[in-house]
């Protein structure tokens, strides 16, 4: 197993992004409306955040929270949002879609992915709502521009899905698709989680905020500790 690790932190504004970078985060996922699971942030916020940090900023591309099934009009809006994010200097996008039957719907996102050429792409937690995580990962692997999936292993939180995430990690390695674990991650859960799953890309939101609340800003001290524990756990599984 590789000893490399990545800590991604959710930011909703410039203060969050700066705090995440100060704490040693490797990447920002920039979103708005966390009460709705995360939607596309405004042009102004994207421009401010990209101009305020030096680490990669991945922008959420999600036009509404009704479902992960998108109409042609939705996709047109999403493609425009991708172009805007790229023009404003974002390093990547976070996107996903499902068909009416719950399968990963990559065909509807072809225009969006074409607009993101040269950017990193993460398939977001629509993955967890798919009918079959294995089939979804196989479908995603057919699109080389998608670097990774963000997943809680189909459970409410990632720590609850250690067995599922270990299997997904092993399959992802064969398919050359990264697996990043997110949802419910806390600083205290990092060590045991990494050892159980082998997953060394972790996504933190409320877990690096005081009291675990999105009503409060990112705490750089919690990011520092998360980064330290993740690096330590990644080294251990590499040695063992």
Image (cartoon, rainbow, N blue to C red):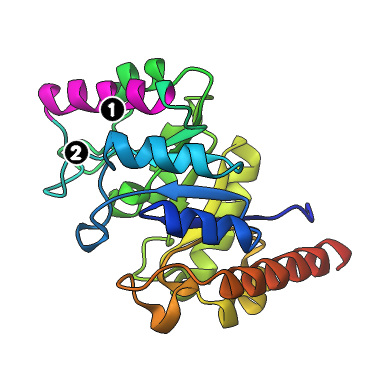
* Left-right relation of 127 to 120: left
Q: Is residue 57 visible?
A: yes
Say above or below: 157 vs 21.
below
Picture coordinates of residue 172 (x, y %)? 58, 44
Asked if the stretch drawn in magenta spans residue 72, the answer is yes
Q: Quadrant of residue 175?
A: top right
The secondary structure making up most of the magenta span is helix
Q: Separation of disc 2 and disc 1 at Cα? A: 9 Å
Residue drawn at x 27%, y 59% is 34
If you read the primary sequence from the N terminus, does the residue marked by circle 2 or circle 1 appear first?
2
Residue drawn at x 38%, y 28% is 85
Where is the N terminus found, in terms of image quarters? bottom right
Picture coordinates of residue 58 (x, y %)? 46, 40
Residue drawn at x 82%, y 64% is 235
Residue drawn at x 35%, y 54% is 12
The residue labelled by disc 2 is 63
Q: Which residues are magenta?
A: 71-86
The residue labelled by disc 1 is 81
Tags 2 and 1 touching, CB below 8 Å = yes
Q: Nearer the viewer, residue 124 or 37?
A: 37
Say above or below: 172 vs 219.
above
* Left-right relation of 47 to 55: left
């Amino acid at each position: 197993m590789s000893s490399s690790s990545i800590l991604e932190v959710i930011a909703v504004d410039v203060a969050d992004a700066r705090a995440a970078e100060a704490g040693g985060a490797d990447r920002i996922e920039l979103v708005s409306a966390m009460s709705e699971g995360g939607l596309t942030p405004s042009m102004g916020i994207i421009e401010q955040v990209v101009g305020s940090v030096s680490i990669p900023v991945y922008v959420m591309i999600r036009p509404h929270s009704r479902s992960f099934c998108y109409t042609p009009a939705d996709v047109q809006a999403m493609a425009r949002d991708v172009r805007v994010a790229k023009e404003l200097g974002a390093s990547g996008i976070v996107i996903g879609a499902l068909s009416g039957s719950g399968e990963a719907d990559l065909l509807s996102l072809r225009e969006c992915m074409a607009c993101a050429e040269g950017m990193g792409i993460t398939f977001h937690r629509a993955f967890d709502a798919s009918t079959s995580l294995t089939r979804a990962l196989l479908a995603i692997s057919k699109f080389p521009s998608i670097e990774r999936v963000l997943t809680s292993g189909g459970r409410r939180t990632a720590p609850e899905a250690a067995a599922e995430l270990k299997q997904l990690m092993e399959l992802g390695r064969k398919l050359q698709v990264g697996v990043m674990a997110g949802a419910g991650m806390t600083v205290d859960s990092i060590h045991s989680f990494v050892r159980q799953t082998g997953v060394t890309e972790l996504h933190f939101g409320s877990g690096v905020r005081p009291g675990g609340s999105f009503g409060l800003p990112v705490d750089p001290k919690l990011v520092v500790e998360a980064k330290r524990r993740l690096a330590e756990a990644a080294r251990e599984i590499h040695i063992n």
